[in-house]
Amino acid sequence: MIDSESRTMPSSTPETVKKPRRLLKFLIGGLVVLGVIYTAGWYYLARELETRVATNIAAFKERGIDATCENARASGFPLRVGLDCTKVGWADKAKNLSVTAGSFRSAAQLYDPMRINSVIEGPAALDLPGFIPLDAKWDGLTSSIRLDRPLPKEIRIDGKNVVVSGRDPGAAPIAVVGSGQLDFRANDPQMDVSLSFNKLKLADNVVPNRSLPELTGAADIGLANGFALLGKTERNLTVLRGQSGTLRKVDLSFEDGSGVGITGPFSVAEDGRITGEFRVTLRNPEGFAKAVQDIVPEAGNTISTVLQALAFAPRDANGAPTLPISVKNGKTSVGFINIGRLPAL
């Protein structure tokens, strides 16, 4: 009986033992092949990136622009691909524009290659039209770009403890900001621009005969045809002529907590005159009025007129007075009270 059962039980033959081992070998071999293909693909992309950078730099030079990315090399293996440079620069002699900075590191995750994050080290040397030569340094400066066609869909720049000063040895800071952020979001033809800064202090000589307080501010502006700005050559506020949009939020605060917030739609005529319907909210109106009058003493009468109107203004949920301000071709009024004219852009 026992002999009969032993004859019917399966036994481990050399063939059955070899099958799992073969599968394991095939699996390991497949992983090795995939690893080799992945590595070869990554290094192919890296070479293409380095070649593209060199080609673009050469193309810029043909247009009279000296773009530099010293010691450019691809980096990020195995999960990212990016570009590192020991020094970066951009010089356009025709526009008297030159910017140089320290090392630059960028990277994109392979699963999200259209999002590029970068870090740039200071200090930077800035030569800008109409300005004295400037130096800038910072504790942190990063950017994030979402690529799209024909232009990036999102751009974000963050800075921390940024100091800008003249290039002369021992020059005092011209501007210091604790932190700042700039965002561009595009959805052709619309464009959204957001800006925020904290503890901005400008030197007293930036505006002649004016002592400027420390400022904190934020803005969120939507432009109905913002894409049109990209094709314009102007580098001042005249670029906004013909534009319309909405001030979702424009806010400015002083150290004592007083401040002003502005919202509302606007348009800019081709002659630079502004038209819009705005709601202006003042926090601590007396403190805000005093701060503004210290900066612009010649506007004392206008400031007094606005303060008088605030006595009858409705209040928001926080008890801050809110004024409806109408602007028509630059002429500004609160109800039937004219308070001046805005300069043309």
Image (spheres, rainbow, N blue to C red):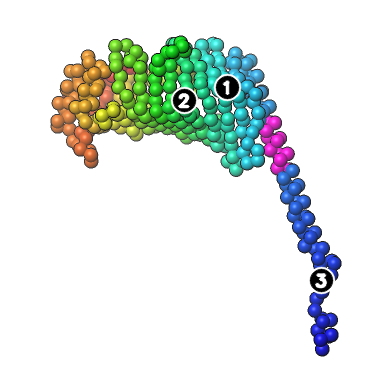
The residue type indicated by label 1 comes to Val
| The label number, if any, that marks residue 12 in the structure image | 3
**Discs 1/3, front:** 3
Label 2 crowd (10 A; few <14 / some 14-19 / many >=20): many
Locate residue 24: give its quadrant: bottom right
Q: Up-down: is 121 above or below 1?
A: above
Element type at mark 3: loop
Q: What stretch is highlighted in magenta?
A: 37-48
Residue drawn at x 35%, y 17% is 203
**Residue at the spot of label 1:** 88
Would you say residue 47 sits in the magenta stretch?
A: yes
| The label number, if any, that marks residue 329 in the structure image | none
For marks 1 and 3 on the same chain, the one whose residue lies earlier in the sequence = 3
The residue type indicated by label 3 comes to Ser
Q: Up-down: is 86 above or below 187?
A: above
Q: In this view, does 180 lie to the left or right of 304?
A: right
**Discs 2/1, front:** 2
In space, the residues marked 3 and 2 are separated at their CA atoms by 71 Å
Q: Which of 274 and 83 is in front in this view?
A: 83
Q: Quadrant of the N terminus?
A: bottom right
Would you say residue 210 sits in the magenta stretch?
A: no
For marks 2 and 1 on the same chain, the one whose residue lies earlier in the sequence = 1
Farthest front residue? 170
**Residue at the spot of label 2:** 138
In space, the residues marked 2 and 1 are separated at their CA atoms by 16 Å
Element type at mark 2: loop
Residue drawn at x 77%, y 59% is 23
Could you tell me if the residues under marks 2 and 1 are in contact, i.e. CB atoms within 8 Å? Answer: no
The residue type indicated by label 2 comes to Trp
